[in-house]
Amino acid sequence: MPWWSWVVIWVVLVLALLGMVGYLGYRLFVKAMTTLRALGELTEKSDLLSARFDETAEPAFHPAVLGPVREYAGLWEARRARIATIRHTRREVRIRRGKLLVSADPSRFSHLLRKRN
């Protein structure tokens, strides 16, 4: 192989490397600009959210330990009664649905038992 073929090979390899580095650099630049644009939008949204958060007043915190025991006990019992009612209603619905499944009329499904010839 003549000496100039090595020069041609290395020139082609260096040009391919420079082209690939340029292409990857361009893609990186485009992605960085997209990221910066999205970061700007995120900053605007977070500023808007923080402004809305500052506008809303939070209710004062009153620890239950320092409050009247009878009042909180009444609230607790009311909550437990409400949860028990919800559970009872769901249980009744499940029982009703189960009774419908158990008491289904088998003649309604006789077409499934017929053999086809």
Image: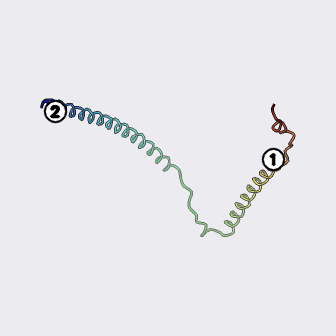
As helix, strand or loop, the secondary structure at mark 1 comes to helix
Given contact means CB atoms under 8 Å apart, are the residues at marks 2 and 1 in contact?
no
Give how far across and how far down residue 108 sits, in percent.
85, 39
Label 2 is placed on what type of residue?
Answer: Trp
At 70% from the left edge and 60% from the top edge, which residue is drawn?
79
Q: Looking at this view, is 39 or 8 the one in front?
A: 8
As helix, strand or loop, the secondary structure at mark 2 comes to helix
Give how far across and how far down residue 100 sits, in percent.
82, 47
Give how far across and how far down residue 66 sits, in percent.
60, 69
79 sits left or right of 111 in the view: left
Marked residue nearer the N-terminal end (2 or 1): 2
User: Which disc number belongs to residue 117?
Assistant: none
User: Which residue is tagged 2?
Assistant: 6
In the image, residue 96 above or below residue 70: above
Task: State the separation of the CA atoms marked 2 and 1.
Answer: 85 Å
36 sits left or right of 10 in the view: right
Q: How many marks?
A: 2
The image quadrant that residue 5 belongs to is top left
In the image, residue 55 above or below residue 113: below
The image quadrant that residue 67 belongs to is bottom right
Label 1 is placed on what type of residue?
Answer: Leu
Mark closer to the observer (2, 1): 2
User: Which disc number belongs to residue 101?
Assistant: 1
Q: Residues within 10 Å of mark 2 (few under 14, many from 20)?
A: few
Quadrant, the C terminus: top right
At 26% from the left edge and 34% from the top edge, which residue is drawn?
22
Quadrant, the N terminus: top left
Q: Looking at this view, is 48 or 39 the one in front?
A: 39
At 18% from the left edge and 34% from the top edge, which residue is drawn?
10
43 sits left or right of 1 in the view: right
